[in-house]
Amino acid sequence: LLLFFLSLMMMFSTPLLSSCSRHVLTRWKGLPPPLSCLRLLSSSASAFAASAVDLASIKELREKSGAPISDVKAALQAANGQMDAAFDELRKRGLAASRKKAGRAATEGVVAIATESDGSAAAVVELNSETDFVARNDKFISLARSLAQHALAQTPEGHVGELDAEALRASTITGGNQTVADTVIEVAATVRENLQFRRAWAARLSGSSLISTYVHGKIEPDIGRIASVVALSPEADASASADNALAL
């Protein structure tokens, strides 16, 4: 029965199984298995191990990149499990995809406010997305906050009014190593929507002038749907300024 079973394997199995079956028959006759079969099995096992991706690596890269699991797995396999190389590959794919979406309408989004702790300056930015769902995404909100802080840092003394949006896009973002435009594109690649840094407004006053802000439709204390900024004379206090901002 054993010999009959092995004969069937030799006739109908894959070349690998067929070859190894013949070697089993050889061993059955008292001879050692040929090294070629062992090498064949070893190379097949190595190829399978190389194609397998550790679940922990998939989870880590998924959280780091925000890319779909299928893309994460494919990138890890292409990079032979190297995390940095796989992340770079995902980033390149995402940037290419986000640039293709640049022409799509982005009519949702948020405004974000950043202020100096002494009330001497404030900046407001508008960041748009395609859907309200993405506008509430943590990465999107974090980007809006970073842009507001960057706009505040770029506001010169005595300025009141809109900031040059093109100049801001070309500038290196505060605390980072790439431009505002590239930062927006990178986040767009993660959330898979067209994102647009639309505009910025800021005020920085000297002396004892006081600036106060108000955010309406809050998602977070400094982020919402509508924002207002009020500058008052030295005689005013912070509570009065906040009341006036609310009235607007």
Image (spheres, rainbow, N blue to C red):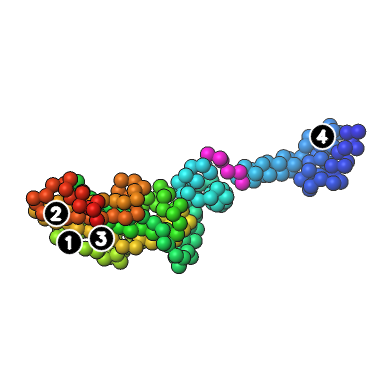
Q: Secondary structure at mark 2?
A: strand
Upstream in sequence: badge 3 or badge 4: 4
Q: Residues within 10 Å of mark 2 (few under 14, many from 20)?
A: some
Q: Secondary structure at mark 1?
A: loop
The magenta stretch is 51-56
User: Disc 2 to disc 4, how far (Cα)?
Assistant: 96 Å
Upstream in sequence: badge 1 or badge 2: 1
Q: Are marks 2 and 4 in contact (CB under 8 Å)?
A: no
Task: Write down the residue under mark 4.
Answer: 27
Task: Write down the residue under mark 3.
Answer: 201
Give the quadrant of residue 2.
Answer: top right
Pinpoint residue 41: horizontal percent, then vertical percent: 71, 41
Residue occupying image coordinates x 24% and y 64%: 162
Q: Is residue 52 magenta?
A: yes
Disc tally is: 4
In this image, 151 relative to 233: left or right? right
